[in-house]
Amino acid sequence: MRNLALIFSIFLVACEKNESTQVAPQPTKMTYEQALKSDDFKKIAGNIGSKFTEEDRAKMGAANAKMKEEMANAGLTVGAMAPDFTLTNAFGGQVSLKETLEQGPVVLVFYRGAWCPFCNIHLKVLQDNMPEFKKYNAQLIAVTPQQPDRSLEQLKSGNYDFEVLSDLDNKVMQDYNLYFEVAPDVVEIYKRVGIDLEGHNGEGRVGLPVPGTFVIDQQGKIVAQHADADYSKRMEPAEILKVLSSL
């Protein structure tokens, strides 16, 4: 369940904003949490689970428990100024946070890679809510440790209408207090079941971010955030829209 590259097709319909009450638009179909409970996801979980031995599960469980302890306070806090950065997008162009903020608030999402099913669900749900984000002139930026060519494949497969940037030296993940190294034995287990972290990220690079979402206002201040060492937990579009509507 934790280790499968899959783009989920999840279609969301968002409510229109009620101008008189200033209520943020709300997704009206499938949320991220609902998608995790879908029959499709349960089927995937059953299939992938059969690939792991009891020894694999014990090693991954121990490594995950250690990571959760070390990253219990992952992510910059609300009120902090968001560190600026310039990263390469999937097409080889340069994108900076500072310049993007000139257009409006930014929803900054850190995710593990195209191989992660939880990430793919979350990105798809966010993509389906892009029209609602744009009502507040908000821009969505996704940051990943994977190589730009991997991001390009993912961007095309998911029809993403947002920037996907590659943090190839891990600096941005570190600046936002999200970076950790995957345990060597887990790296090998992943590779055996078809998830080659070095193949995605580059030789010698097996670090990942704790998945995190930050809503940043035009002054560069973090006004909302969600970062959880439990990588199955993500910020819902409804939460993001509520914050954007208050700016």
Image (tube, rainbow, N blue to C red):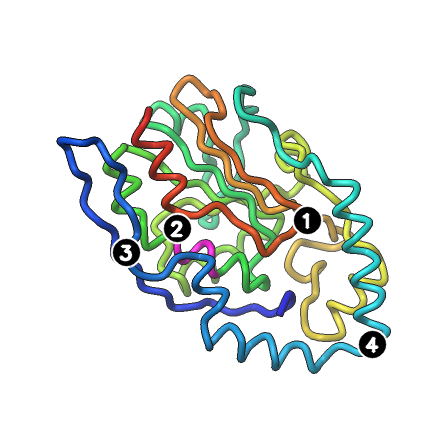
> Sequence order check: which comes first, mark 3 or mark 1?
3
Q: CA distance from mark 4 to mark 1?
A: 24 Å
Give the SS element for disc 3.
Answer: loop
Residue 244 in magenta stretch:
no
Residue drawn at (71%, 80%), measured in percent from left and top?
51
According to the image, label 1 marks what residue?
A: 208
Amino acid on which the number 2 mark rests in the picture: Leu
According to the image, label 4 marks what residue?
A: 54
Residue drawn at (59%, 75%), measured in percent from left and top?
45
Amino acid on which the number 3 mark rests in the picture: Thr
Q: Position of residue 186 (x, y in %)?
A: 80, 62
Label 1 packing within 10 angstroms: few (<14), some (14-19), many (20+): many
Q: Nearer the viewer, mark 3 or mark 4?
A: 3
Label 2 packing within 10 angstroms: few (<14), some (14-19), many (20+): many
According to the image, label 2 marks what residue?
A: 126
Q: Is residue 14 above or below residue 221?
A: below
